[in-house]
Amino acid sequence: MLKSARVPLLAMGAATAAALAAAAPAQSAVGPHAKLCEAGKPAVLARVSGFKVPRGTLSVKLYASNSRFLEKGAFLRKVEVPVTRAGAIDVCVPVPSSGRYALSVRHEVGAEKSRSDGGGFSGNPKLSLFDAILKRKPNLDTVSFTVNGSTRVVPVVLYYLQGGSLRPVA
């Protein structure tokens, strides 16, 4: 019975597997504000999954859900943590108040920016190399979410350059 239960999981496909990985609990919240999320205070728990390699630095930026999304210096909070293990990583990011927000996430594999780095957004919009080259922003309605008086878990699947396209690691 155990073997037959595993077969459907293998047949689900990468997108479904990524969604399940994002929904699965990570080990525990990390970052300088981890205690806020553990206590259920107003914050975002960015559940980042799909790492290409378990090393480097993970940067999570919180933006107000408005027209300044992704503009240089417009983020409200930035939390950086080292990537030291495989699997999903929960990064706690405080919010200034209840409201609509969006996340931008970057995984820098090495000390400098390179083509091996990955990234993603809240709402997990489909990313294309063409959009990245033209520096097109994802649709704000797709990446926005609401935080009320408690911690909001927001899954983010990382995309990496693979061949001629951006996609999650399979």
Image (spheres, grey):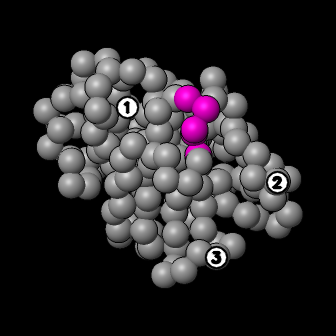
- Main secondary structure of the magenta stretch: loop
Residue positioned 26% across, 53% down in the render:
30
Label 2 neighbour load within 10 Å: few <14, some 14-19, many 20+: few
Q: Is residue 76 magenta?
A: no
Please say if 60 is above or below 138.
below
Pointer 1 or 3: first along the chain: 3
Disc 1, disc 3: CB below 8 Å? Answer: no
- Specify the label residue 134 is tagged with: 2
Say which of marks 1 and 3 sits in front. 3
Give the quarter of the image for residue 125.
top right
Residue positioned 45% across, 46% down in the render:
75
Residue 48, position as x, y percentages in the image: 45, 48
The residue to which callout 1 is attached is 153
- Specify the label residue 30 is tagged with: none
Which residue type carries mark 3?
Answer: Ser
Q: Which residues are magenta?
A: 66-70
Please say if 75 is above or below 113.
above
Question: Gap between marks 1 and 3, in whole Å?
Answer: 29 Å
Label 1 neighbour load within 10 Å: few <14, some 14-19, many 20+: some
Which residue type carries mark 2?
Answer: Leu
Q: Where's the C terminus, which quadrant?
A: bottom right
Residue 54 seen from this side: yes
Which residue type carries mark 1?
Answer: Val
Residue 3, position as x, y percentages in the image: 52, 41
Mark 1 element type? strand
Mark 2 element type? loop
Question: Gap between marks 1 and 2, in whole Å?
Answer: 30 Å
Mark 3 element type? loop
The residue to which callout 3 is attached is 114
Residue positioned 14% across, 43% down in the render:
35
Say which of marks 3 and 2 sits in front. 2
Give the quarter of the image for residue 79.
bottom left
